[in-house]
Image: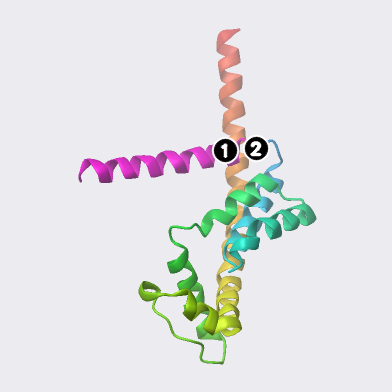
Amino acid sequence: MNKNRTSRWVRLKRWTRYHYLRIMRLAATPHSIAMGLALGIFVGFLPIIPFQTIVVLALAFVFRGNKIAAALGTWISNPVDLPFFYYGLYLVGSLVLPFAGPGFDPHHLEMKQLIEAGWELFAMMLTGGLILGIPASVITYFATSKAVSVYRKRRMLRMLKKRTHIG
């Protein structure tokens, strides 16, 4: 493995750990953090990029989820993998919806194709997003709730252990 590839993995690992700890240390209940992250993951699967933050913050308010965790969750659909992510949503949606939507290749995608495809394409991607987003958000909720509870319990035990050794 060359040095550039190694440093890329190190940066990815550091970025992942930073966001993991940021979520674990949020000043909220495990339920609130898990609900926020699950809502963010769900909205991240929907093809509404310019409105994701507004939608997820409104949902976090309604469902009493942590807003920071919700905003972080939407980054499941990040700018780097967005064309491939949306293509996956399109494929899943096209398996379910009865109409034959416009075909396109993500490697030769042009904005003109997206505009011409219009609502059929959006409906397919939205359907795919719902099909993938619902189970992903349910799994995220339970995994995050458990992870935050376990993390906090271990952290509290570590801090108690330090205090008893010092005093």
Q: Quadrant of the C terminus?
A: top right
For the point 56% across and 92% down, the residue is 98
The percent position of residue 69, horizontal first and vertical second, equals 63, 47
Instruction: Check if residue 80 falls in the magenta segment.
Output: no
The percent position of residue 49, horizontal first and vertical second, equals 59, 63
Rate crowding at label 2 as few (under 14), some (14 to 19) or many (20 or more) other CA atoms within 10 Å: some
Q: Most prominent secondary structure in the magenta stretch?
A: helix
The percent position of residue 123, horizontal first and vertical second, equals 60, 80
Q: Which residue is mark 2?
A: 26
Q: Which residue is mark 1?
A: 22
For the point 52% across and 57% down, the residue is 76
For the point 35% across and 40% down, the residue is 10
Asked whether the residues under the numbered discs 1 and 2 touch, taking CB atoms below 8 Å apart as contact, a structural biologist would say: yes
State the residue lying farthest toward the front. Answer: 112
Q: Which residues are magenta?
A: 1-26
Residue 104 visible in the displayed image = yes
Asked which secondary structure carries label 2, the reply is: loop
Q: Which color scheme did the rendering employ for the protein?
A: rainbow
Image position of 132 with respect to 44: above or below:
below
The percent position of residue 92, horizontal first and vertical second, equals 50, 78
